[in-house]
Image (tube, helix red, strand yellow):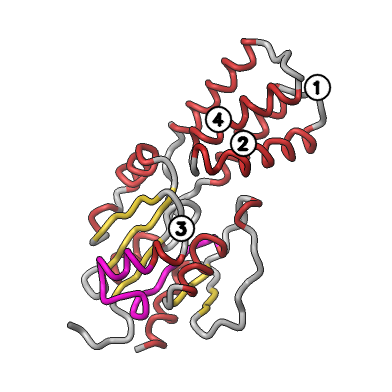
Amino acid sequence: MSQRPLTTIGFDADDTLWQNEQFYRLTELQFTDLLADHADSDHISARLLEAEKRNLRHYGFGIKGFTLSMIETAIEITEGDVPASVIAQILDIGRDLLAHPVETLPHVRQTLEALSGNYLLVLITKGDLFDQERKLAQSGLGDLFDAIEIVSDKNASTYRRIFSKVGDGPERAMMIGNSLKSDIVPALAAGSYGVFVPHELTWAFEHVEEPTEAPRFRKIGHLGELSEVIQALS
């Protein structure tokens, strides 16, 4: 077993390896336009966010739960008078979201290729199983990972389990992602390094304060800067 301080590196997928939130934002704009006769867009978006948060424990993360939350919000906003044609349009834009193209972010492939073979690379993503598998296949990045973990949620126990199963335990692992709440804070709690890569668009549910006092917390501007962080640990 290697005695290096870092042997395993986990990567989030959505908005860390490829674009995701921008497609949700565009879909939300279409949704608010559908209900424009009933309320202003800010009110509709706020009600939709409430529905999403309320439904996470029922539907989990992902597009299917988002689509059901849009339908529920439409029923609430119209006080039960939403036309069937509008429900059909909501289902259509939900299906379009499931078919959006995969657009990898800058420096992703080069970074993964440079690390592959030197570290155990693990993709750790949450959301709908079929959708995440589709995006991974279309990205062409799958062969660069030693393990793929699609989970229902991300917490400290998740990272302890995965990093112990795949690597040498959480203390010798690092998690990279754009969500402080899902990728960084729980990884730090598990004893791992957490490298925050901010994305210009992040779902409101994922916002928490940066754990700047945590000794294993790092922040970079893009994945091209990751190698410097890793080298500093050697």
Q: In terms of sequence position, does the residue under pointer 1 or pointer 2 come before the other?
A: 2
Which label lies toward us, 2 or 4? 4
Q: Where, by quadrant of the figure, is residue 30 drawn?
A: top right
Query: Of residues 228 and 70, which is closer to you in this image?
Result: 70
CB of mark 2 within 8 Å of CB of mark 4?
no
Residue under label 3, please give it: 154
Q: Where, by quadrant of the figure, is residue 213 drawn?
A: bottom right
- Distance between the Cα atoms at labels 2 and 4? 13 Å
Residue under label 2, please give it: 26
Q: In the image, 200: left or right of 146?
A: right
Q: In terms of sequence position, does the residue under pointer 3 or pointer 1 come before the other?
A: 1
Which label lies toward us, 4 or 3? 3
Quarter of the image where the N terminus is located = bottom left
Q: Is residue 169 magenta?
A: yes
Residue under label 4, please give it: 67
Residue shown at the point (43%, 58%) measured from the top left: 12
- Distance between the Cα atoms at labels 4 and 1? 19 Å
Q: In terms of sequence position, does the residue under pointer 2 or pointer 4 come before the other?
A: 2
Residue shown at the point (46%, 70%) measured from the top left: 187
Please determine whether, in this image, residue 147 is positioned above or below residue 68: below
Which residue occupies the extreme top position in the image?
Answer: 84
Q: Which residues are magenta?
A: 160-179
Residue shown at the point (67%, 41%) measured from the top left: 49
Kind of residue at disc 3: Lys
Kind of residue at disc 2: Leu
CB of mark 4 within 8 Å of CB of mark 3?
no
Kind of residue at disc 4: Thr
Which label lies toward us, 3 or 1? 3
Q: Residues within 10 Å of mark 4 (few under 14, many from 20)?
A: many
Point out which mark residue 38 bears: 1
